[in-house]
Amino acid sequence: MTFRVVAVPLLLIATTATAQVAAPPPPAKVAPDAGMPALPTWTKPALRGAWNDTKRTPDARAKALVAAMTREEKHALVFGYFGTDFPVSLYIAPKEALEGSAGYVPPIARLCIPAQFQTDAGVGVATQGGAKNKRGRTALPSGLAIAAGWDLSVARAGGAMIGDEARRSGFNVMLAGGVNLLREPRNGRNFEYGGEDPLLAGTIVGEQVIGIQSNHVISTIKHYAINDQETDRNTGNSILDHSAARVSDLLAFQFAIERATPGSIMCSYNRVDGTHACENSWLLTDVLRTDWGFKGYVMSDWGATHSTVAAVTAGLDQDSGFPFDTKPFFGAPLREALAQGTVKPAQLDLMSERILHAMFAQGLFEHPLQQQAIDMPAHAAVSRNAAEAGIVLLKNERNLLPLVAKAKRIAIIGGHADKGVLAGGGSSLVYPAEGNAVPGIAPTTWPGPIMYYPSSPMEEIKRQLPGATVRFADGSYLAAAAALARDSDVVIVFGTQWAGESFDVPMALDGQQDALIDAVASANRNTAVVLETGGPVAMPWIDKVGAVVAAWYPGTAGGAAIANVLTGRVNPSGRLPVTFARSVDQLPDPAAPHSGDVVYREGAAVGYKWFDSKALKPLFPFGYGLSYSRFDTSGLRASVADGTISASFTVRNSGAVAGATVGQVYIAPVAGGWEAPKRLGGFAKVSLGAGASQSVSVTVDPRLLATWDEAGHQWRIAGGSYRVMLADSAVDVKQTVTVTVPARTMPATWRAR
C-alpha cells in the first residue's frame, strides 16, 4: 500500500488503499479570541445541594444540579477540548488535561462537578500520536478478535481490565466500544468493531461496555451510525432504507445500548440521508431518544460537528475535541444562538442534564479520580486469555496442528514474528510499556506508527518446544524463504495486513505476501499460515497450505496466545464473526468503497445473509471454526411462549482433549419474507472436558423474528411456521425443528426484559 501521509491527527482521509491520502483543510488556528468557553476558575467555596443526595435518581440529581448552574457553567459542560497539543493549528491543550489524551472537559469547582478526562479507545488506554511521552498500557486484542471469541465473560473481563487501567491512569470517560456492522470488508476500522451480525456485535460490545463502566468510567458506544468505511469519511453519505437499517446496523446499536446502558453515544463523521450524523434528528432524537429511551448524552466525534443550531436541535449534547471542527460551534456561536433565541435556554438545560445524568449514573461524583499503580502482568494475562478465546482455526489438514515433538525443524517466516505482533492504527492505538518491537516502518506518524507489540510468537514457540530447532526468515526474498521451507519439517508463515483509522484497505495481505506464501507452500506442503489482519482477506494460496489460523490483532500478549494455540497448550475455540469471501466479486459492491453517496443496496442482508440470499459459497462462513477436539450438538427442542421462541440442545465433547465450542441457533420463517433465508437468533459458548456434555438453552429476542414497519413505526412479526436451526456455522445446520409463532406487532419502544 502506498500513502501520502499528512500529519493532521484525526482528520486524515483516504480514498482507496492504493490512492494518495488527501487531507481536508487544517483546523482553524486557535487564538485567544477563538470563542471557546473560558476555562472556569472559582475562588468561592463549593456549593452543595440536593444533587449530592445519592438516594435520588440520576435524573433527579441532574435536574437539581442544572437548576443551580449559571449559563456559563452549562456552557462549559457542553464543550470539550482535545487533550494534546496540536502544533499544526497552533493549539495548546489545557494544562489540566492529561498528556497525550483524547479530550478534556474542565471541572466546575463551585458545584463540585468533576472534570471529564477522556481517553481512546476500545482495546485500551491509548495515547495520541502527537504526544511527546507515550503512556505504556495493556492492549486487548482487536474488537473483531473479541467478537470472534463469542464469549460474554471474556468480553466483560476485557472491558473491566481496560476500564480499570483508564481509571488508574486518571480517566473517567473511555471512548469505547465500537459496534458498527462489518458491511464492507475493506473498511480500515473493521478491527475496532464487533463483526457483521447485530445480535453478536451488540451483545459482545455491550458486555465490554458493562465491564468498562464497572470502574465508574463512562463508556461511549460509537460510531453512530451506518459508518462502514473510512473513504470520504467526513462527507460520505450513507444511504440505507430505514426499515433495513432498523433490523441491521441500528439493531446492533440497540442491543448494545439496552444491554449496557452506556453513559454516552458518539455520533459519527459520515452523513446519513444527506445530513451529518451529528446533526441528524432522525438518528439522535427520533430513534435514540424517543424510540430507545436513551438518557445519557451524545458527544460528537472529534471534528464531526458542523453546525450550532442544527446540531443542538437534532440532539447533540457535547461538542468534543476542539480544535478539530472548523469553528468552536458550541463556543461563541452557541452563545450567539442563545442570545438570538435560535437555541432556547431550555435546550441548553437539557443538554447539561443528559451529561450530568451519565456522570451521576456512573458514580463520577462519588468516586473521584486518583492515579494508581497498574498490575500489568495480571492485565497481560487478561489480554492473552481474550486473544486465545478469539483465535480461529480455519483449516487443519492432516492434523498439521498442533505442533508436536516430532517436528524437529521448524521454519518461521515473515510478519516480524521474531519480534512481536501487529496492532491496528489510528486513535485507538495503545502504546506498549516496552516500546515498539519493530520501530521505523512507515508511516511513522498518523495514522501510524505501525506498531508491533513486543510479544514474539517465535520466542514463545522456542520456549514451548525446547527440543526443536526454530529458524527465522523475514520473507523479503522468496527464494531464500522457499529454501528454508524445503529444509524444515513444518513451516509457519505469518501474514499481516495493517489497517487503521482514516483509510480503507484491499481485501488482501500487504505487499507481496500472497506470493511469499505460495512459494513457501509449494516448497513444503506442511505449511501453516497465521493471519494478523484487520478483517477478512482473500487467500489465493488456500489449497496449497495445510493449516490457517486467524489471529486478528492479538494484543499485548498476542505472541504467547498464538504460540499456545499452535502448540496445543490451548485448544482453539474462536468462531468467525464475519464471512470470509473468496474474492471481492462475491461482495454486494465489488467496486467499493466509494466517495460521495454510498448506497447500500443489499439493505439488511449483511455478511452471511448476503451470501445466503445469493446462494454464494464463501471461503469461510460466519460462525465457522475448528478445534483440536470434536464436538457434537444434538437434541434440539424449541417452544414458543408469549410469542417468544426458546430453544434447548445438548453439546458433547466427543474428542480426547478439553475445549470449547459455540452452539448457534438460527431462525427462519417458512414462508420467507426476510432480507435473507435466516438470521442468528441465539448462541452460547460452552467449555467441556473430554467426554463431557452439557445442556444449553437460548431465548430468541422477538425483534429477531420481526421486520420493521416504517409506515406504522413498529415491529411486525408475521404469524406462521418458523424453522429453528441448530448449527455449527451459518452454512452447517445440524438439526431443525419447526414451531408456530403468532402474529404480533410491537411498538418502537419495546425492549426485552
Image (spheres, rainbow, N blue to C red):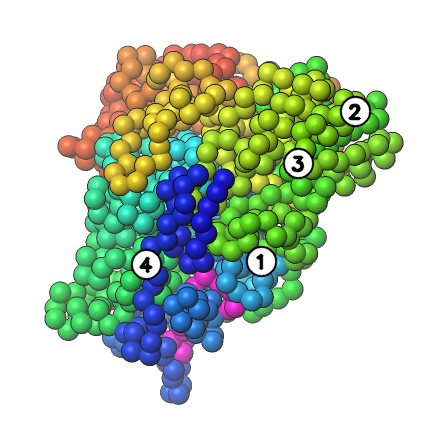
Q: Secondary structure at mark 2?
A: loop
Disc 3 to disc 1, C-alpha distance: 38 Å
Q: Earlier in the sequence, mark 2 or mark 1?
A: 1
Q: Is residue 543 visible?
A: yes
Say which amino acid is labelled 3: Ser
Q: Residues within 10 Å of mark 2 (few under 14, many from 20)?
A: many
Measured in 3D between alpha carbons, the distance from the residue under mark 4 to the one under mark 1, in whole angstroms, is 35 Å
Magenta part of the chain: 98-112
How far apart are labels 2 and 3 at the CA level?
A: 18 Å
Q: Earlier in the sequence, mark 4 or mark 3?
A: 4
Q: Are marks 2 and 1 in contact (CB under 8 Å)?
A: no
- Expressed as whole percent of the image width and height from the top left, the position of residue 359 reads 40, 62
Please provide percent x and percent y for residue 744.
Answer: 24, 25
Q: Are marks 4 and 3 in contact (CB under 8 Å)?
A: no
Classify residue 531 by image quadrant: top right
Mark pair 2, 1: CA separation: 43 Å
Q: Nearer the viewer, mark 2 or mark 1?
A: 2
- For the point 64% across and 43% down, the residue is 421
